[in-house]
Amino acid sequence: MAKNQRGWLRKKKYANGMTWLFCFQVTRPSDGKRVENCKPVGLVAAFPGEKAAWVEVGKLGLEKHLDNPVGPEPTFKEIAEHWRLHELRREGIIGKKAVETVKCSEHNLDKYVLPRWGGCVAGRMRPSEVEGWFEVLATGARG
């Protein structure tokens, strides 16, 4: 996975075996510089695929370590990633989504929505543009 606001996974060998690490950028308070930080997720033997490791990242709530503020003119992708981390993958009883709902929502977001709208400045998006895109999708054409 590319290094981005969501963080990334890395494997590292430790004494107890190959381990998944959830890595992310944080702002160092002493000088304001962005630096890498990592938290262990679990052994690769327990989570053999990257997808399983990401599920465990969600279960452990490791996204709370991210400190990526959304700027004054956020892109649609920045808002969508914030929603993904803080709403779609919400833990707890109230507001928690079913696993299938999360999978379906992330699939649609990653395959269709972000490739088309991710780079757009959210405040400059016009409803008529989005509605037109929905119309194109409804006809089965690519848009």
Image (cartoon, rainbow, N blue to C red):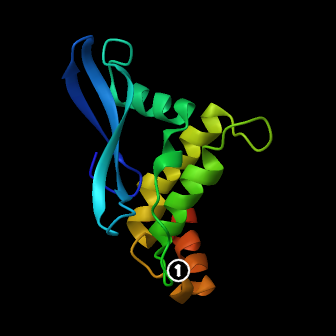
- Judging depth in this view, the residue of 30 and 121 nearest the camera is 30
Residue at figure coordinates x 53%, y 31% from the top left: 60
Residue highlighted by disc 1:
122
Q: Is residue 75 above or below residue 58?
A: below
Q: Position of residue 46 (x, y in %)?
A: 38, 13
Q: Is residue 98 left or right of residue 35?
A: right
What residue is rendered at 65% in x and 44% in y?
90
Visible residue check, residue 32: yes
Q: Residue furthest left?
A: 13
- Callout 1: few (<14), some (14-19), or many (20+) C-alpha neighbours within 10 Å? some
Q: Is residue 91 left or right of residue 73?
A: right
**Does 53 appear above or below 75?**
above
Query: Foreground residue, 103 or 72?
Result: 72
Going 35% across and 64% down the picture, which residue do you hit?
30
Circle 1: residue type? Ala
Name the spot of residue 120 as percent of width and height, x first: 43, 79
Left or right of 45 on screen, residue 127: right
Question: Seen from this angle, which residue lies furthest right?
Answer: 94
Secondary structure at badge 1 equals helix
Disc count in the image? Answer: 1
